[in-house]
Amino acid sequence: MFSKACEYGIRASIYIGQQSADQGRRVGLRDIATEIGSPEAFTAKVLQLLVRAGLVTSVKGPTGGFELTAEQLRTVTLREIVVAIDGGEMLQGCALGLRQCSARQPCPMHYQFLPIRDQLNELLRTHTIGELAGKVHDGLGFLKQFS
Amino acid sequence: MFSKACEYGIRASIYIGQQSADQGRRVGLRDIATEIGSPEAFTAKVLQLLVRAGLVTSVKGPTGGFELTAEQLRTVTLREIVVAIDGGEMLQGCALGLRQCSARQPCPMHYQFLPIRDQLNELLRTHTIGELAGKVHDGLGFLKQFS
DNA sequence: TGATTACCGGATATATTTGTCCGGTATTTG
DNA sequence: CAAATACCGGACAAATATATCCGGTAATCA
Ligand code: FES
Ligand code: FES
């Protein structure tokens, strides 16, 4: 569904958000990678994308790390994360790969596929990182499996 | 959403199905690639997968080519095509990439994501190649854009 | 039977995604 | 200021997806 980069980006953002909301605490790269079960260096690349897009805040030096401001917790949506990493392709593209998804020359799946794609867009648009972080905080959601 | 291989596979199957239903006519690789706008050799690889999976029929030699039998037209679903090419990953996997999508240790998106994934599964499961080929035949769907 | 046709299958090439390494820079602390 | 910390950024490496090439094989037809 999403790329690995995007999966890591979302999980990392939620973890950072949870720690920021919970303790007002910054978290370092090593901590993040451990807690979400992702490769450290690759996760760094993804986070740099999000920082440059203004979706996550980073601070250098001792006591530094990543955090989400109160405003970021409240306003940053899943959609913004996905677009920053994977681009808008999957959120607008044709299911069968036609260059342009449109009712002008629709593929045979177009009218069946559209409502599903729209629901996915809606899902991403209406869920903030802060909201998802809350679920993790309440033990209703996990960012890693232990088994 | 789907891989390129899968997109080509679906479009090719529908085109083959349309020609089989319409004219009882076999179609060659070159014809297929031209009509759906895909790279010829790569499309061949994908079709070989589908033939081996029994979803498409091929005949060698002069007057040979690819076709869909009446039974294949009636029974082969999009889901079978997708599974044969991309595997079941996307149809069962976790949106955030957790190793196992399950209510035991769900990711924070699990309960919102599940109904959408289920609808996608249902869409693929309930549409046959013959049905989609009919739309193309009736000019209600296209497998390539001319612009 | 010989020649032609067209799918088959393996090897190879290219592009993209995923993952790693390492020195640079900004920041804190003593 | 000096040393330690931790993100930044570019180069590099590996894995996978996409795409091509070419000889082999089966089938048709004259
Ligand atoms: S044209 Fe294919 S999904 Fe819209
Ligand atoms: S656990 Fe993530 S979608 Fe089910």
Image (cartoon, coloured by chain):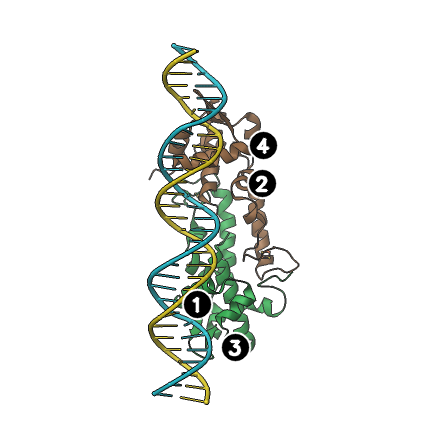
Chain colours: A green, B brown, C yellow, D cyan
What is the three-letter code of the residue carrying label 2? Arg
- Give the Cα separation between the discs numbered 1 and 4: 47 Å
Query: Is the residue indicated by label 4 positioned so its CB lies within 8 Å of ligand 1?
Result: no
- Say few, some or many: other residues with alpha carbon within 10 Å of mark 4 (under 14 / 14 to 19 / 20 or more): some
Q: Does label 1 point to a residue whose CB lies under 8 Å from ligand 2?
A: no
Q: Which of A93 and A144 is in front in this view?
A: A144
Q: Is residue B132 visible?
A: no
Question: Which dot marks residue B75?
Answer: 4
Crowding at dot 3, Cα within 10 Å, few <14 / some 14-19 / many 20+, comes out as some
Quick one: SS at disc 3?
A: loop
Residue at mark 4 to residue at mark 3: CA–CA distance:
57 Å
Ligand 1 has an atom within 8 Å of the beta carbon of the residue at disc 2 = no
Q: What distance separates the C-alpha of mark 1 from that of mark 3?
A: 17 Å
Residue drawn 43% across the image and 43% down it = A97
- Residue position for label 3: A25
Amino acid type shown at disc 3: Arg
Question: What residue is drawn where x is 52% and y is 49%?
Answer: A116
Label 1, label 2: how many angstroms apart (C-alpha)? 38 Å
Do marks 1 and 2 share a chain? no
Q: Name the residue under label 2.
A: B125
Q: Which residue is drawn at 45% across and 52% down?
A: A91
- The residue nearer to you, when weighing B96 against A134, is B96
Corner quadrant of residue A85 = bottom left
Of residues A48 and B126, the one nearer the viewer is: A48
Q: Mark 2 lies on which chain?
A: B
